[in-house]
Amino acid sequence: MAKLRGAFTALITPMTADGAVDYDGFRSLIRFQLDAGITGLLPLGTTGETPTLTEAEEDALAEIAVSECHNYTKRMVPVILGAGSNCTRDAVRYVSRAKELGADYALVVTPYYNKPSDEGIFRHFEAVSQVGIPILVYNIAGRTGKNISTELLSRIAELPNIAGVKEASGNVSQMMEVIDKIGRKKNDFSVLSGDDSLTLALAGVGGDGVISVVSNLAPAEVTEMTMAALNGDMKKAQDLHYRLLPFMKAAFVETNPCPIKYAMSVKGLPSGGLRLPLVPVLPASEKIITAALKESGLL
């Protein structure tokens, strides 16, 4: 497996005024990302409002993403397709779909709500690993209610086709432990930040980049910052990090992806509304987001 390194955008799903998926807008967002130099794209993640999409909508979005990325003439752009479920049978089916549609990787989240034991989590990833497509483990206890410990992740990492982890625990100490115990021993295992504001810190201790929300709006800037950090130009990376930091914070002033969709609408990018139970950000949050865009030089 080729090791993932760089900046990867967790894509929003733009909507039309009547709440339908804006497929033309989605295609234009992908082209915007590719032309800006983004390393790779992640459709059908949490940021893409996947819990409210139909499977037919998911299929169509995945097909567009794979077609646009794999036919991009300037370079190879990998597609990481969201494929998680708290039902192992469905997760295997979604990972199989990712493989059939030609995605390069599948992102599989910790089973949520049912809060399985460590053995249950291991068997869940064991099942999806057998499909035959590289798997990124998605560790985000804030949404799933269950943290994957480094000890458990070490065991999962020994399964076939496990390519790395999207680390969104928010615990830098745990991230460093993952790099030390797994990343430094398995050359093809990627440790990617799931938090924009921790990208620089993670790169500084040996991480491999970020799966970013902010890059929906600022793909060139996030890519430049990430690659500077990965290439050892920490002064440049720090300058870009602190420039973008106000917006990195504002992008999570309310539940993701509500703030980033509002910010993109301010910039005139395809975004549209949200599907219930998500709702537009409050007026007070609009002011925070707009001010942060200006402070970060993005507006």
Image: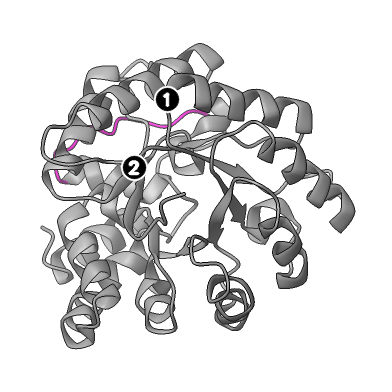
Question: Which residue is located at x 44 percent, y 84 percent?
Answer: 205
Query: What's the residue at 40%, 15% (across, down)?
Result: 60
Mark 1, Cα crowd under 10 Å, few <14 / some 14-19 / many 20+, is: some
Residue 19 visible here: no
| Residue 97 drawn above or below residue 250 | above
Q: Which residue is mark 2?
A: 41
Residue 74 occupies quadrant = top left
Task: Compute the Cα span from label 1 to label 2.
Answer: 13 Å
Q: Label 2 is placed on what type of residue?
A: Leu
Q: Residue at x 38, y 16 (%)?
A: 20
Outermost residue to the bottom? 235
Residue 114, x across and y down, in percent: 84, 43
Q: Circle 2 sits in a helix, a strand or a loop, which is it?
A: strand
Three-letter residue code for mark 1: Gly
What residue is rendered at 34% in x and 41% in y? Answer: 78
Q: Position of residue 127 (x, y in %)?
A: 76, 37
Question: What range of the chain is rendered magenta?
Answer: 267-276
Query: Hey, which quadrant is residue 247 in on the image?
Result: bottom left
Circle 1 residue: 102
- In the image, 74 versus 144, the foreground residue is 74
Which residue is more in the foreground, 281 or 114?
114
